[in-house]
Image (cartoon, rainbow, N blue to C red):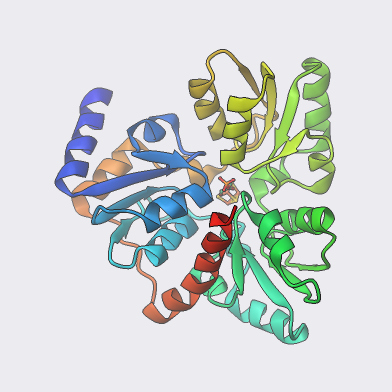
Amino acid sequence: MLDSLKNEILRLRDERDALILAHNYQLGEVQDIADFTGDSLELSFKAANCEKSLIVFCGVTFMAETAAILAPGKTVLLPVLEAGCPMADMADAPRLRKMKSEHPGALVVTYVNSSADVKAESDICVTSANALKIVSSLPSDKEIIFVPDKNLGAYCAKMTGRKMILWPGFCPTHMRITPEHILKRKSEYPGAKVVVHPESPLDVIALADEALSTGGMLKYARNSPAKRIIVATEIGLIYRLEKENPDKQFIPVSEQAICPDMKMTRLEDVLAALKNMKHVVKIPEKIANLAKIPIERMMAESRKA
Ligand code: 13P
Ligand code: SF4
C-alpha cells in the first residue's frame, strides 16, 4: 500500500516535471520521497536553482512563499494549505511599519519565518544558519530591529554585541523546551553532547554545546566524534539524524517539542497536490518584488566565504 502510494507520487512527479522539497521536520515518510530535504536556507537555494517547472513544497507557508518569490517562473504547491507557522503569524506589516517609524534609520533584519508582507518591509533576511554572520556584517552605527523571533534576536544580540530592538514573537514548539528538560537529559546521559536550535530561549541555549540550525545539527552529528547527542529542537529531525548516523544515539530533549504544522503533510497530501495541482502559492507581484530584495541580500551574504 505504502509502496504503491510512493510509486504513484514519483510517477506523477516525473510526469509533472516536479521537484519535491521537504523541511527537516517533515514526517519521515515525506522526507523519504522528497528529492531534497533540508533546512530553511538550503531549501531556499534549492528553490532558487530549480530547473523543473513545478516545486512541491512539503513544509509550511512561509517556506513555500519564499520558494515562490525566488522562483517566479515556476509553480509552487503547498500540499496542505493550513500548514502555517504560528511565529510567522505573530508579525504583520502595519505594526512593523509603526515600529520602523519609531526607530528611524534602524535596519530591519527579518527571520525567514515571516510573511511575504513583512519581508517586503525589511532590509535583509536571515535564517538560523546565517543570522550571526549577517548581523555581524551590518554597519555598526545602525540600530537593528529584529523580527519576529525574540529568541533568535536575543541570541544574535548576545553573540554579536549589537543593540537590537526585538519583536516579541517566538516559536511555540521551541518555547516548550526548558532548562529543566536539558538538565534532566544531561543527568540521564552523562557525557552526551547537547545541540539546541537558536529559536530556544537564552537560558536553554546557555546549557548547550552548540546552537545550530537543523542543517547545522545534521552536519555536527556527521562530523562530531560524540556517540550520544541530546537534541533540543522539533523531534522530526531525529528521523534524519538516525538514518544518516546509525552508529550514534540521538536523544530528543522533550517529546513535547512537536510542531503540529510541520506534521500536517502526509504522503496522501503530496499525491493529492500533484494530482490536483493544489495549492498554488501566489504572492501579489508588488509584494513579491519587494520581498525578494531582502531574501536575495541574505543569499548573497551566505555565499560569501
Ligand atoms: P531551520 O531548519 O532553518 O533551522 O529552521 C527551523 C524552523 O523552525 C523552521 O520552521
Ligand atoms: Fe514555526 Fe516553530 Fe513550527 Fe518552525 S517549528 S514552523 S518556527 S512554529
Could you say where residue 302 lies in the image, as x and y percent from the top left? 57, 56
Find residue 154 and report its horizontal and vertical position in percent: 79, 57
Q: In this rendering, does residue 47 appear at all?
A: yes
Residue 209 falls left or right of residue 267 = right
Res. 235 visible in picture: no
Going by the image, does 260 lie left or right of 91?
left
- Residue furthest top in the image: 247
Judging depth in this view, the residue of 139 and 179 nearest the camera is 139
Of the pair 41 and 63, the residue shown nearer to us: 41
Q: Residue at x 60, y 74 (%)?
A: 122
Q: Quadrant of residue 179?
A: top right
Residue 43 percent coordinates (x, y)? 45, 49
> Percent from the top left, x then y, of residue 7?
21, 30
Q: Residue furthest front?
A: 305
Q: Nearer the viewer, residue 212 or 166?
A: 212
How many dots with numbers? 0
Q: Is residue 192 above or below residue 104?
A: above
Task: Say above or below: 221 vs 234.
Answer: above
From what the image shows, is residue 200 above or below residue 94? above
Quadrant of the image for the N terminus? top left
Image point (50%, 55%), residue name? 84
**56 versus 249 height, above or below:** below
Residue at x 20% of width, y 52% of height? 276
